[in-house]
Amino acid sequence: MRLCLFVLTLLPLISFGQDPTATSSDQQFAMIKGQGVPVCEAYLELLNQSSLEPTPFCGRPETGPVPFAPLERRDLGVDDILPLFNYVWEFLRFNDQHHVDKFFHPHADPSKQYGVDESKSYWSADVETADGITQIRDVLHRMSVWTYKTPVDIGNDGMPVRLLVWQGYGVPEWGGGKCGVVYGRDVSYNPQRVFVLSTDGKTIDEAQTRAIFGMPTKPSSKARDTAREPLSYPDPPAGAKPFKALADSIGIFGYDGRYYIQTENTPASHRAGPDPVQDEPPPVKVFLRERGHTSQVCAFRPQNVPKPWR
Amino acid sequence: MIGLNDVIRRAVSRAMPNWREKFSWGVMAAAILLFAGWYWRYGGPWNIDPKKDAQLANGWVTNCSGPDFKKFAQVGGVGPGPPRPVFKINDQLVLAVPKGNWPSAGRINHEPYKCREISDLPNVPYLYFVIQGNWSGGADRKDAPLDVRDKKVIPDAVTVRVEHYRTGLSPSDEVAMDQVVSKYDNKMADKHDVGGLTCGRFVPTPPTNEQGGQLCWVQRTSSDPDDLRMKTAVDEKKSPLVFVDATNTSKRYGGLLVYWQVWTSDLAHARDIDQAIWNSLAEWNLVSEPEVRTGQNY
């Protein structure tokens, strides 16, 4: 009897001692999958130690102390972004970076817009201009694009590839807002995509991007988010078969010789409620791609994370 | 005494000591002379007529003539000529589009060597054009939201893209589209009728659409050849002009995808705009009516 009482008294302490972070409500995240797995424990600690302003959706840590891999970002300027913009735009909308859209640029003078002087108005297959990207990137801060200084072995197959990370405008059709900022009743959750680039870095390696950062096609795949599919950006035209991403916000990190994919979706009702800031954010998930297959290894529930900025 | 002829002969002998070298120099000299003649006659490869190049960049074919093209034959000719470049979408839709409507397809390197029949025309993967309407009752570009005014908004100027829908509308496509519509239908807030369209706000609204717009579609019947859907990207309560982005997947003309975009003030005219596009296609089509399987007879 005494032994039973002793055990019952210790039980909460034992369970507490097993995973102090999982029940500590002052931590930003709690683990819901991956207890005891070194990479999960380490990434949880990294998440909990990181400043995640304005909100984790807009950026989660990519690197930390050893044995995290020292990923070094190289932010792309307008001159680097412009040649890639069409490819990203068309690949996301039509799953084909070489699909052609044309945009009409009428002459400012209405008398020269139609038929009068056809050399003045023109069609262009370029989605954006350098000025447009400068405005959106540097003035409005509605997009951020980067690569890494060295290729990354994201497939963990000994074949490093060049990665391109694209957050904000270009993924959505419209400029969106600054990520994690509340506009009226709406939160600007700028989606983030990762692309595998061709060896020369000038185009998208479509097959590898689909395989590694796309939504698995088999519904039974462990990588598929059964709770909710990511939103489709941009809203595709009928007849188009857009690229389907693994999640709304995708990032990477490396740990102990392997590279991982970390994701988060937008809150399911982030725009419907009277106070979108109060929406419960979905879990952060970590995936490992190995031997050509992607599997989820960790999941973390946000419990005390920064809210979007008003 | 050494004459000028001797000097030249000695110089040539030194520079070209054998027949092989003499032959090489001769070929080079001939090539230079030919190039110089071509340059003198045509102005060289850099003298491309910018107007012609702009036409090729937009896929304009203007050299067609013959009975197939008599519908828009110019005075003194048997083809539509430069005022109406010709584009073949498929066998049922061959359009002679007035240049004032700014037709634009993919770049071609040159026009067909001969264009006497419609079969001489290559199919274009897509065709863009512009039609100008007056559905907004004199709205001004200043009525557009502030952040897009610099993009030269022209009210009621509809940019249209037409392409052949290669697979047509299979029964599975129709089921898929109905599923999409019912998905929208179930997630709509503030659902209401606008000029024959069912419109509402998508919940949750994609974060792309921060300015607040609507999704609209036509309630289809099984005999309806069209599936017209559109989204607006600006809240009509906040801006007199809204941006409408529409897609019509149609069984007309052997299967077409028609995309159109416009800044307009009244969404109730959206179906009128769509009809104006179909009217234009019918007017410009060179394929005679009995051969065209239109919406009522597809």
Image: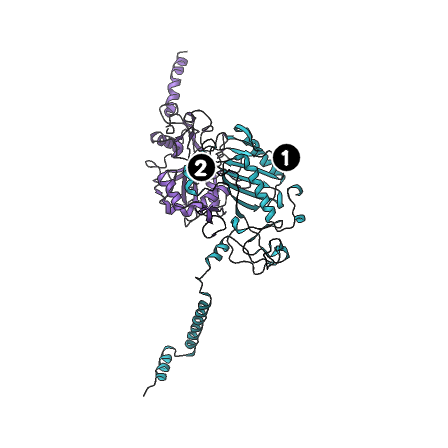
Chain colours: A purple, B cyan
Which residue is at the front of the view, B54 or A269? Answer: B54
| Quadrant in the picture for residue A14 | top left
Q: Which subunit holds the residue at mark 2?
A: B
- Apparent side of residue B115 relative to residue A242 in the rendered image (left or right): right
Q: Quadrant of the N terminus of chain A?
A: top left
Residue B223 x/y as whole percent: 65, 37
Residue designated by label 1 = B221
Q: Residues within 10 Å of mark 1 (few under 14, many from 20)?
A: few
- Apparent side of residue A66 relative to residue B240 in the rendered image (left or right): left
Residue designated by label 2 = B143
Which residue is at the front of the view, B189 or A287? Answer: B189
Residue B161 x/y as whole percent: 53, 45
Q: Which subunit holds the residue at mark 1?
A: B
Residue type, numbered disc 1: Thr
Residue A223 x/y as whole percent: 48, 35
Q: Quadrant of the C terminus of chain A?
A: top left
Residue B165 x/y as whole percent: 58, 45
